[in-house]
Image (cartoon, grey):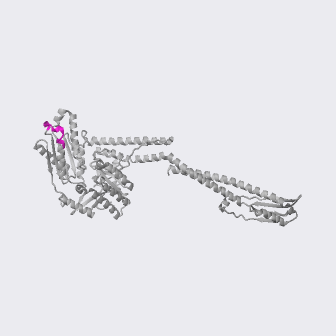
Amino acid sequence: MTLYRQLILFITALLVVLFVSSFVISVRNVQSFLQEQLLSHAQDTATSLGLSMTTAAAENDVATLNSMADVIFDRGYYHHIVFADLEQRPIIERHMSLALEGVPSWFVRIIPLETPPASSEIMSGWRRVGVLTVVSHPGFAYRELWRVAQDNFVLFGSVSLVAYLLIGFGLHLLLRPLDAVEKQADAICQRNFVQQPFLPKTRELRRVVEAMNRMAGKLKIMFTEQVELTEQMRAQSHRDPVTGLSNRRDFDDRMAAYLASEEVSKEGALMIVQLSGIGRFNQEHGREAGDDLMRQVGEKIKQALQLIPNVLLARRTGADFTAFLPAVNEAKARKVLEQCFQDVIGMQVFAQEARSNMVHLGMSYTTQRREVAELLADADMALRRAQGKGPNGLEYSVLSTEDDADEIKSAGDWLNLFKGILADKQLTLHYQPAFSCPDKQVMHYEVLARVKAGYKLIPAGVFLPMAERYDLLADFDRLIVETTCQFTKQQLITGPRFCVNLSARSVQNAEFVGWLEQYLQSEVEFAGRLILEVQEYCVQLAEAKLRDLIERLEPLGVKFSIDHFGVGASAFSYLQSLRVHYLKVSNSFVRNIAENSDNKFFIKSVLQIARGQDIKLFAEGVETEAEWNALSDLGIDGALGYYLCKPQQNLPV
């Protein structure tokens, strides 16, 4: 119960006590006064009527006595009039019933009025001739008492209404700072460390607001320091200190993790950029100039690759850079290679004739799943051929172009396949459970899309890059959402949520976002069990659009997740303002984690950040029991991978 309601109830109880006390006292006073008036009225009547009856009583003139009694009794103010002789035998008797008009019977029972009799002796000289007894009728007194009670009730109700309005308004003003404190606390829980600019005048409330502001400030500093420390440690173990790019170990781990996954495209290219004569350049211009040159070259390559999703770029050795371009076709790979060469060779430092033989590029392209060493060896051979051709050159190599989806050879085949799938809504979904650590309870199901080509099912990692070329990603994301919703309805599934991946293109597509909002508004039950997941690359590319999507769908019960967390170059500080509910650490940090202390430290640090922001942390790509045990020991919230359960067309658990 809120403090406002508690105060209202307390004030209500106080007003009721005051009213009851005032009412009882007022009614009792009026009751006592009316009883005295009834007695006085009866006594006065008995005295005056007794004097009037003296002569008629002495002469035993009953007719006159009756006439005199009727004159008084017929006025209706008397309940009982009796004239009795000395033997107590009634000579004249008048009686009126106690029927009360306009007064509730319950009121009469609760508040009785005593009507004591008044007597007067009738004398004839010094001789007593009889006794006159008069009892006043309480009807008029009850009506007066009932009127007073009604007036008190109306007065109390009016005063109470005005008091409630004034008290409610006053409490609203008084407790407004507490409402602001509540909103501030909610904002802090959502990782928005706001501070209240206005301080209340009430001293106690001012202290509460000041304490909340201090706490918000300290929590913001703690969160920022923790994020910065984690990023620094990640940079020290995974980043080249000169260029800020990935180092050799980080590049190899991430590329190996990517190539080991069956859910990604087999198509890709590996590029090596090698600079010659760097030792001589350092001798002539100094080590700082050489480091600055490395930074400039790294930036040029990074700019040429900025439109490639999930690209991996690293400074492999002192003068070598490597880049892995996942899910690109051969034409795009050649274009990127040529663009990198033109951007680097166009730098002023390489335009001088003395340094005309410093830049060589080699690239290896494949459509089959390869080992990292195989791709590196082929790209290195291409690089050697470029160096053998003469100064400043590039060479391109294509490994086997055989594809598992051998039924689909041309771009036209892909387009026809996509048109048929979207028209018939024939999409195959697989489900992979995410388990809690360490008790292995299903927390949600990862939804994985497949398309059928001939007799083969092609995973999303293969067909989505092709769909992107035809700008069909939003159409496929829409079909995946609809198919998942229909599946949950048909199977009458209750319990765990379903996690659906959205492409960055869809997040930036206003038409798709509008459709998604309307669709989930019409499917409220499904929306309450839906997790929408985007890759960390999407945060870098469209953070504002993603934030808008979260603000629109979170009220419907939709949760949000960041996939491949940790592989992007962006700072983790976006977790402070972006309302996400799950993080999935990239499998590059999970591979062989039992023997990798740096990755252990990274995941433990991220876990601390996530716990502080009320985010659940998952690990993807768990392939061995050792990895599962190591993650469980770290206290991670959950994990998924082939060791736990492979994707299946029906719910596996």
Reply above or below: 235 against 618. Answer: above
On the image, the x and y values in percent for residue 524 come to 38, 59
On the image, the x and y values in percent for residue 58 come to 87, 62
Q: Nearer the viewer, residue 255 or 148?
A: 148
Q: What stretch is highlighted in magenta?
A: 343-355
Image mark count: 0
Who's the residue at 36% across and 62% down the image? 493
Who's the residue at 47% across and 45% down the image? 177
On the image, the x and y values in percent for residue 545 come to 32, 50
On the image, the x and y values in percent for residue 73 come to 77, 63
Who's the residue at 36% across and 46% down the image? 577
Residue 575 visible (yes or no): yes
Q: Which of 299 and 575 is in front in this view?
A: 299
Who's the residue at 21% across and 38% down the image? 293
Residue 112 visible (yes or no): no
The residue furthest right is: 126
Tell me: 598 left or right of 133.
left
Which quadrant is home to the C terminus? Answer: bottom left
The residue furthest bottom is: 63
* Magenta-drawn stretch, dominant element (helix, strand or loop): helix
Give yes or no for residue 256 being in the magenta stretch: no
Give yes or no for residue 354 being in the magenta stretch: yes
